[in-house]
Image: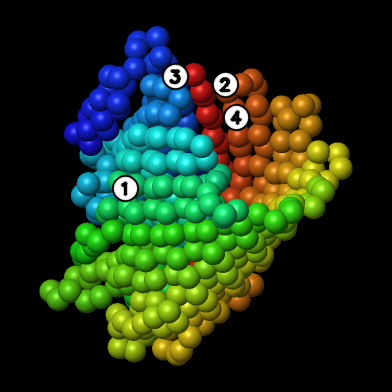
C-alpha cells in the first residue's frame, strides 16, 4: 500500500510530461552472505537479499526513486526484529524466513540548488566512517552487530527533507513521521545481545524476560547548517525526537518493555581536505539522555551525555588507503549499567592492485576502555562491473559483558557475493 501511494504520486507528477520526457532506469541487486562459525563448525549465516530498484525522471525538476528489499535467511543469524519498527515502516512478513521492506520510495523536486524529497528515505549527517557521533537521526540495523561491510546500516522512514543554500550556508531540514528504533537481533539469533549493558543490567547468561515494545508515534525533526571556507566544511545541527537506542523498563508479569524515549542532540562537525589526506571531527551533546541504571535493577534516569570523535583518511602511495578513528562516549553520574566512558578506536587499511580488480583489507575495532575488540581481514575480487566476490574472517575477543566480548565465541569465516543488473 505504501509503495502504491508513492507510485501514484509519481504518476500524477509525470502526467504533465509527454511520454518522450519520461525516462525509467530499472536496476536489480542480488547479494548473498554466508558464514561458518570457527568454533561450532556450523552455518552461522545464510542470507539472500534481492533489491529491485527503479528511477524515473519526469522533467528537469521532478524524479522518483523506488527501492525494495526481499530478504530470506535459513540459518541462525536470522532477519532481526520487526517489533522495533513503527507500524507504517515495518517490513512485511512473507514467512518465518522471508520478509519484504521498502528501502526507498521518494519523490524529488530540484531547482537552482534547492531540493525537496518526500517519501521513505534516510538522513546521513555524520562525517566519520561508522562511528555514530552526530549521525544519530536514523535508526540502524544492528542484527549483525558491527560485522557488516558498511556502517551504519540506516533504516529509512516516511517523511520530508528540504535542502537549499542562502548567504553561503547550506541548509538541510528533515522531519520523519515515525519513531522506528534500531533493529536488533531476534531472540536466538547469532548476534543476540548478551552483555548486561544492552539488557537493562541483567547478567550475561540470564534468560531475557518476555520483551514488549513501546514504539513512539512522535516525529523526529532536525536542522543542519553547513558552511564551506577554503578546504574546510563546518556544520552545526540539532535533532529532536525519539532516541533510537531503547531503555528497558519492567512491565509486570515477568516482562520488560523497550522504551524509545525522546531526546535532543546538539552537534557540530568539521572536515578538511589537504592533498592526500582528509581530517574529520565531530562532537555531540545530549542533555538529559535516557539511560538505564543499576540500582534499582531496570532503573531509569536522565543523564547528560557527550560524544566526540576524530578521524583521518589517507591515500598512501602504491594504492594503499588508510582510515583511522577514535571516538569517546561519556555519560555522567554513577550506578550505570555501562562504564561512564567508552573509548573506541578503528583502523582500516586497504591495498588495491590490478586496476582495483583486487583489494585486500584489514579492519580492527577496539574498545580501549574494556579491552574488547575484533580484527577482520578480507579479500575482494571485482570480476567486472556487475559481479563482486568477498571473503574474510571475523575474530573477536573480550569479556562476556563487553561491547565486543559478548560475541567472543562467534569467530567466523564468511563469504559475500553481489551481482548487479
Mark 4 vs mark 3: which is more N-terminal? 3
| CA distance separating discs 4 and 3 | 25 Å
Q: Nearer the viewer, mark 3 or mark 1?
A: 1
Point out which mark residue 197 bears. Answer: none
Mark 3 vs mark 1: which is more N-terminal? 3
Q: Is residue 394 above or below residue 414?
A: below
Which residue is the extreme one toward the right? 317
Q: Nearer the viewer, mark 3 or mark 2?
A: 3
Q: Taking 171 as reference, is 385 left or right?
A: right
Contact? badges 3 and 1 (CB < 8 Å): no
Q: Is residue 260 among the parts visible in the rendering? A: yes
Point out which mark residue 386 bears. Answer: 2
Label 3 sits on a secondary structure element that is strand
| CA distance separating discs 3 and 1 | 24 Å
Q: Is residue 224 above or below residue 33?
A: below
Q: Is residue 146 above or below residue 286?
A: above
Q: Residue, x 33% and y 41% (percent of image)?
A: 118
| CA distance separating discs 2 and 1 | 32 Å
Label 1 sits on a secondary structure element that is strand
Q: Taking 77 as reference, is 12 left or right?
A: left
Contact? badges 2 and 4 (CB < 8 Å): no
| CA distance separating discs 3 and 2 | 16 Å
Mark 4 vs mark 1: which is more N-terminal? 1
Q: Which residue is mark 1?
A: 159
Q: Which residue is mark 3?
A: 25
Residue 35 on image: x %, y %: 50, 41
Q: Which residue is mark 4?
A: 389
Residue 410 on image: x %, y %: 50, 55
Q: Nearer the viewer, mark 4 or mark 3?
A: 3
Q: Residue, x 25% and y 75% (percent of image)?
A: 249
Amino acid at each position: 500500500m505504501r509503495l502504491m501511494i508513492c507510485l501514484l504520486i509519481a504518476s500524477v507528477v509525470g502526467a504533465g510530461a509527454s511520454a518522450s520526457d519520461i525516462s525509467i532506469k530499472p536496476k536489480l541487486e542480488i547479494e548473498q552472505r554466508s558464514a561458518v562459525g570457527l568454533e561450532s563448525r556450523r552455518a552461522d549465516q545464510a542470507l539472500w537479499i534481492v533489491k529491485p530498484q527503479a528511477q524515473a525522471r519526469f522533467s528537469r525538476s521532478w524524479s522518483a526513486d523506488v527501492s525494495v528489499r526481499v530478504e530470506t535467511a535459513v540459518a541462525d543469524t536470522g532477519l532481526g526484529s520487526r517489533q522495533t519498527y513503527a507500524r507504517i515502516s515495518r517490513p512485511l512478513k512473507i514467512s518465518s524466513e522471508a520478509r519484504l521492506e521498502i528501502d526507498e520510495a521518494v519523490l524529488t523536486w530540484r531547482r537552482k540548488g534547492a531540493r525537496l524529497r518526500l517519501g521513505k528515505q534516510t538522513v546521513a549527517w555524520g562525517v566519520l566512517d561508522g562511528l555514530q557521533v552526530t549521525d544519530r537521526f536514523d535508526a540502524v540495523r544492528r542484527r549483525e552487530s558491527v560485522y557488516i561491510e558498511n556502517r551504519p546500516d540506516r533504516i529509512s522512514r516516511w517523511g520530508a527533507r528540504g535542502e537549499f543554500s542562502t548567504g553561503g550556508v547550506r541548509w538541510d531540514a528533515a522531519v520523519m513521521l515515525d519513531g522506528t528504533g534500531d533493529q536488533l537481533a531476534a531472540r536466538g539469533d547469532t548476534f543476540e545481545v548478551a552483555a548486561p549493558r544492552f539488557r537493562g543490567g541483567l547478567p550475561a547468561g540470564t534468560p531475557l524476560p518476555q520483551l514488549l515494545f513501546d514504539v513512539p508515534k512522535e516525529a523526529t525533526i532536525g536542522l543542519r547548517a553547513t558552511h564551506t571556507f577554503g578546504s574546510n566544511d563546518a556544520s552545526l545541527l540539532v535533532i529532536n525526537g525519539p532516541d533510537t537506542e531503547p531503555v528497558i523498563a519492567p512491565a509486570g508479569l515477568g516482562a520488560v518493555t523497550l522504551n524509545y524515549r525522546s531526546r535532543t542532540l546538539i552537534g557540530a562537525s568539521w572536515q578538511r581536505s589537504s592533498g592526500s589526506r582528509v581530517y574529520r571531527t565531530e562532537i555531540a551533546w545530549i542533555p538529559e539522555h535516557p539511560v538505564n541504571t543499576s540500582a534499582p535493577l531496570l532503573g531509569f534516569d536522565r543523564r547528560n551525555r557527550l560524544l566526540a570523535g576524530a578521524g583521518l583518511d589517507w591515500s598512501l602511495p602504491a594504492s594503499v588507503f588508510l582510515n583511522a578513528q577514535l571516538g569517546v562516549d561519556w555519560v555522567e553520574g554513577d550506578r550505570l549499567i555501562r562504564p561512564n566512558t567508552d573509548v573506541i578506536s578503528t583502523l582500516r587499511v586497504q591495498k588495491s592492485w590490478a586496476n582495483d580488480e583486487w583489494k585486500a583489507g584489514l579492519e580492527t575495532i577496539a574498545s580501549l576502555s574494556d579491552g574488547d575488540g575484533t580484527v577482520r581481514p578480507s579479500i575482494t575480487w571485482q570480476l567486472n562491473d556487475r559481479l563482486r566476490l568477498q571473503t574474510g574472517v571475523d575474530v573477536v575477543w573480550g569479556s562476556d559483558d563487553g561491547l565486543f566480548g559478548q560475541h567472543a565465541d562467534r569467530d567466523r569465516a564468511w563469504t559475500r557475493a553481489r551481482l548487479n543488473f
